Image: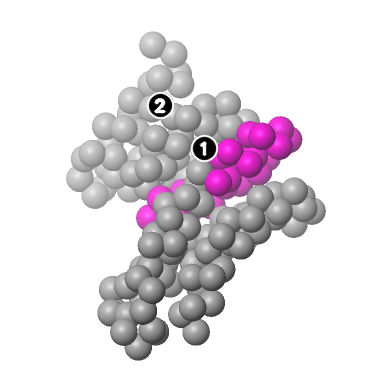
């Protein structure tokens, strides 16, 4: 078994475990994302499988977005930035078409969380890479009518 397989086996097992071990696994993923961006990018599919379980943690969102943004290939950037934005954008696109006063508290909390998560992704992108902002901007343009309808 190679080191890569060992890391993913370790992390996957601990993610299913109690909160102390889960936090340790999240910390490992977070550190890998911030310190080994090329490793994360080279193993992005494995990290995205973990991301599917962890996208509620802002440091994981930030780390994976940062690792993706470290790459130069436009198709890679577009595909994976859209993929990590997808859970939040999809939920926003599915917000019921009702007036703001008709939204229940849990829906409002979810909207705020999803917008905050998209903001986390945007803030983790390097400011000097316009192409990255354009990819995320295209996602925001899709959800803008929903956001606008809430006000």
Q: Is residue 66 above or below residue 75?
A: below
Q: Residue furthest bottom?
A: 101
Q: Nearer the viewer, residue 98 or 66?
A: 98
Asked if the residues shown at circle 1 and circle 2 are in contact, with their CB atoms under 8 angstroms apart, the answer is: yes
- Is 19 on the left or on the right of 110, as rendered? left
- Is 117 on the left or on the right of 24, as rendered? right
Q: Residue furthest top?
A: 1
Secondary structure under the numbered disc 2 in the rendered image:
helix
- Is 76 on the left or on the right of 93, as rendered? right
Q: Residue at horizontal 51%, vertical 52%?
A: 85
Q: Is residue 55 above or below residue 12?
A: below
Name the residue that disc number 1 marks. 32
Chief SS of the magenta region: helix
Q: Is residue 136 above or below residue 32?
A: below
Q: Earlier in the sequence, mark 1 or mark 2?
A: 2
Q: Residue at horizontal 41%, vertical 70%?
A: 111
Q: Position of residue 23 (x, y in %)?
A: 33, 48
Name the residue that disc number 2 marks. 7
Q: Residue furthest front?
A: 97
Q: Does the rendering let one see residue 109?
A: no
- Crowding around mark 2 (Cα neighbors within 10 Å: few <14, some 14 to 19, many 20+) is few
Q: Specify start and end residues of the magenta stretch as a single range.
A: 55-82
Q: Position of residue 118 (x, y in %)?
A: 53, 60
Secondary structure under the numbered disc 1 in the rendered image:
helix
Whether residue 65 is in magenta: the answer is yes
Q: Position of residue 62 (x, y in %)?
A: 54, 52
Q: Residue at horizontal 64%, vertical 55%?
A: 138
Whether residue 61 is in magenta: the answer is yes
């Amino acid at each position: 078994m190679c080191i890569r397989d060992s890391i993913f086996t370790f992390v996957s097992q601990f993610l299913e475990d109690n909160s102390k071990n889960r936090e340790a696994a999240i910390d490992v993923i977070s550190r890998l994302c911030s310190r080994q961006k090329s490793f994360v990018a080279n193993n992005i599919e494995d990290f995205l499988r973990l991301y599917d379980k962890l996208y509620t943690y802002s440091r994981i969102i930030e780390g994976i977005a940062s690792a993706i943004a470290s790459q130069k290939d436009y198709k890679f950037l577009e595909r994976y930035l859209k993929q990590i934005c997808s859970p939040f954008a999809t939920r926003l696109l599915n917000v019921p078409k009702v007036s703001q006063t008709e939204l229940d508290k849990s829906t409002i909390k979810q909207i705020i969380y999803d917008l905050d998560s998209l903001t986390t992704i945007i803030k983790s992108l390097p400011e000097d890479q316009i192409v990255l902002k354009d990819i995320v901007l295209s996602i925001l343009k899709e959800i803008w009518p929903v956001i606008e309808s809430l006000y």
